[in-house]
Amino acid sequence: MTMLDVAVIGGGQAGLALGYHLKARDLTFEILDAGTSIGHVWRSRWDSLRLFTPAQYASLPGLSFPAAPDTYPTKDQVADYLQTYVDTVSLPIRLNTRVTALRRDSEHDGYLLSTIGATIAAHNVVVATGPFQTPFIPPVSTGLADEVTQLHSSAYRNPDQLPPGPVLVVGGGNSGFQIAAELAAARPVDLAIGTRNVTVPQRILGRDIFWWQTITGLIGAPASSRRGQWMRRGEGTVIGLSTRDLRRAGVTLRPRLVRTHDDHAVFADNTTLPVPTVIWATGFHRDHSWINIPEAIDDRGSFLHSRGISPVAGLYTLGQPWQRTAGSALLGFVQHDAAHLADHITAYRSTQSGN
């Protein structure tokens, strides 16, 4: 069995950015992705989705995003760009390769990765599967009757796939705000918000928010710094839409959804609402149950790391929100974390090989 220097699990923007830096350092590696095509995660999102980051801030290392500055690429443009990136940089990637188990291989100072039909060996492993893994629908959903249409935001594509009539969107993050605004153009929409998110405009004084964050250094502020902690206030950040914008669009805002029964929703203010259709924009769970290394996982099942570096030698993660900075999970900024990990892996690989 050939032993790779590095196995990268996940072929999204994080895994591809890391591949660029690993290739520049002459390390042997493969990127393993469960999807059928490059950019499949982007293509599977709702039809009207666009990046928050303008094109000039959406590039991976070595290849500029092919769109005019201050335009906001569509999800399919992003997927096309990722495919072009793999072809241009010539990265070794295996599609249709889901890693089902990861365990240590102490005999060869490395790891064994189980996939359907094959086992892959590597001295180092980077988990770059991102934060959007398993759709989360809260237990409160179980009180709804069978005739109520329910779907998670990950399954939402456009308004035409929904039955006619009112919609309740649950979730106060970017997905919830965007989907509610889109649906409100042609039907009654209520949005239940149970989180304390900060809302910021897309543009301030004629400049995009990412321009301001870049020139002020906020986008690169360490997560543990005072500036980083200020940016992380609340439970998240919604860009480009405010609650005022939603009200103007005709969306009725509701507090946290606390209970459902039959075809009714009950909110924290004790108001009720009949709900023929519910969209759960309630986020995702990370799933690390396939990592069979107890020292790498905490009591809640989360990957243990400090700025992407696991306490288990040779094991890393990449592309997590606030892994090092505000830009850690973003298309145009993950390359900085990728370079940091590539340097660490290169140094550690030297000790492994005895050079």
Image: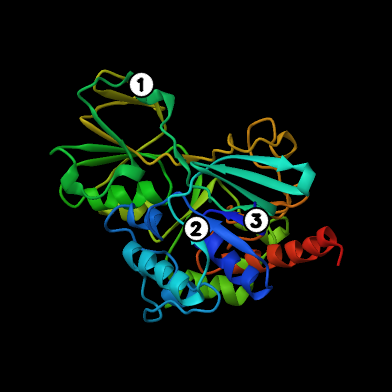
From the viewer's perspective, is the residue at label 3 or at label 1 nearer? Answer: 3
* Crowd around label 2: few <14 · some 14–19 · many ≥20 (10 Å): many
Residue toward you, 195 or 60: 60
From the viewer's perspective, is the residue at label 1 or at label 2 nearer? Answer: 2
Q: Mark 1 — residue?
A: 142
Image point (43%, 67%), residue name: 82
Q: Which mark is residue 193?
A: none
Q: Mark 2 — residue?
A: 11
Q: Mark 3 — residue?
A: 2
Callout 1–callout 2 Cβ contact below 8 Å: no
Q: CA distance from mark 3 to mark 1?
A: 48 Å
| Circle 3: residue type | Thr
Image point (26%, 49%), residue name: 157
Going from N to C along the chain, the mark reached first, 1 or 2, is 2
From this view, report whether residue 232 is shown above or below residue 303: below
From this view, report whether residue 262 is shown above or below residue 110: above
Q: Position of residue 221 (x, y in %)?
A: 67, 65
Image point (15%, 49%), residue name: 186
* Crowd around label 3: few <14 · some 14–19 · many ≥20 (10 Å): few
Residue toward you, 235 or 284: 284
